[in-house]
Amino acid sequence: MNVSFYGHVRQYENIKSEIDANMHEVLMSGSYVMGPMLKRFETELAAYHGTKHAIGVGNGTDAIWLVLMALGIGPGDEVITHPNTFFATAEAIWIAGATAVFVDCCPKTKCICPDKIEAAITPKTKAIVPVHLYGQCADMVAIKKIADKHGLKLIEDNAQAIGASGSGFKIGQLSDAATTSFIIQKNLGTFGDSGGIVTNNPEIDAKVRKLRNHGSNQRNVHSYGFNSRLDDLHAGILSAKLKHIDAWNDNRRKWAARYSAGLKDCKTFDLPVELPGYRHVYHLYVIETKKPEWRDQLVDFLVKNGVDAKTHYSIAIHQQPGYPWGKSARSVGPLTNAEANAACCVSLPMFPELRQDEVDHVIAKVKEWDAMFAAQAPAGKGPAQRESACTCCK
């Protein structure tokens, strides 16, 4: 049996009639950019999040830096985030002209650690960008308290967690804006690339709408801006898919639970953690080997046995060859947990349309590998070089 990492074609086949109908509507309308389908999807996206505004943009990277620019954040300013995420999170800060400041992540959730944030704040700090990594929300309640205390803006990088929620909060509820990516790999993805922003702030909404469209909100009248628009064909695809996102996330949670139940007795890696009161939507199901040298060995074994396992963010941003752009970055404190996560992460196949026999095949092959190395596994949780739990995830 071969188990793919993605199920894009299966998903399309399941709702082909709905997607095709929306695409046909756009094609027959003759309005393909900034047209009625985009407006419809933006209305639907805002309603889904319970926010006043939603704006479609070209991609998830643009979504972050356009919000930063709308908030007036740029050269000379600092933005705090963490380095065990996709490169685009920091890239967007650099595109805006600001300095990226990295702090460590929580050892359990891998999201930014609130305990580490205040030590990184300086008079230049203007914003915090927490990433809802792998599909689980960062501790927005604790981060919001820090942001309010220091007068900082709060922008959620929600590229991986549409439909997730935390203990007592929803995405977009506690921040100035939440950004997302709609590239095909995401829980809600189109047939290409695009992104979005949700916000309750009318000034952010108005400014981003101008910035994404060459600085224009009136025909032939332009100020400073860019070209970053979500076209109507993509909006139509996303509109059709949005109606199914909660059911698809429920499927992801079902397969994650089956993985966790089947792998709970393994000795060579740790399973993902879902915090009490949180709704994890498992954009990725990531296990963490207890020895870094085991990571690639496990991936190679699984691939050779028909399981399309992958690694995600296996080089932390501060260790990337592209770090830093123009020396506009710094780290505060050791990044022990982020580095351990990057060195030991393995992503198992995860998509809503998986079949039970495929999930069970993955479990069987992972257990087969574990049995070969279990006797060599160090005691305790996590890689030996990882720090102990912080207050936010104890």
Image (spheres, rainbow, N blue to C red):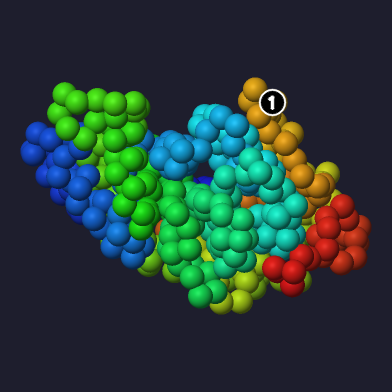
Image quadrant where residue 353 sits: bottom left
Q: What residue do we see at 44% from left, 48% from top?
A: 179
- Expressed as whole percent of the image width and height from the top left, the position of residue 375 reads 91, 62
- Expressed as whole percent of the image width and height from the top left, the position of residue 386 reads 83, 55
Q: What residue do we see at 66% from left, 44% from top?
A: 123
Type of amino acid under label 1 = Lys
Q: Is residue 314 left or right of residue 204?
A: right
Image quadrant where residue 36 sits: top left
> Who is closer to the viewer here, 152 or 81?
152
Res 154 seen here: yes
> Who is closer to the viewer here, 366 or 381?
381
Q: Is residue 179 left or right of residue 148?
A: left
Quadrant in the picture for the C terminus: bottom right
- The residue carrying pointer 1 sits among few (fewer than 14), some (14 to 19) or many (20 or more) residues within 10 Å by Cα, namely few
Q: Which residue is mark 1?
A: 327
Helix, strand, or loop for circle 1? Answer: helix
Image quadrant where residue 208 sits: top left
- Expressed as whole percent of the image width and height from the top left, the position of residue 75 reads 56, 30
> Who is closer to the viewer here, 232 or 179?
179
Q: What residue do we see at 68% from left, 37% from top?
A: 317
Image height of 321 relative to 284, above or below = above
Give the number of marks.
1
Image height of 290 relative to 31, above or below = below
- Expressed as whole percent of the image width and height from the top left, the position of residue 343 reads 76, 44
Q: What residue do we see at 59% from left, 65% from top?
A: 145
Res 313 seen here: no
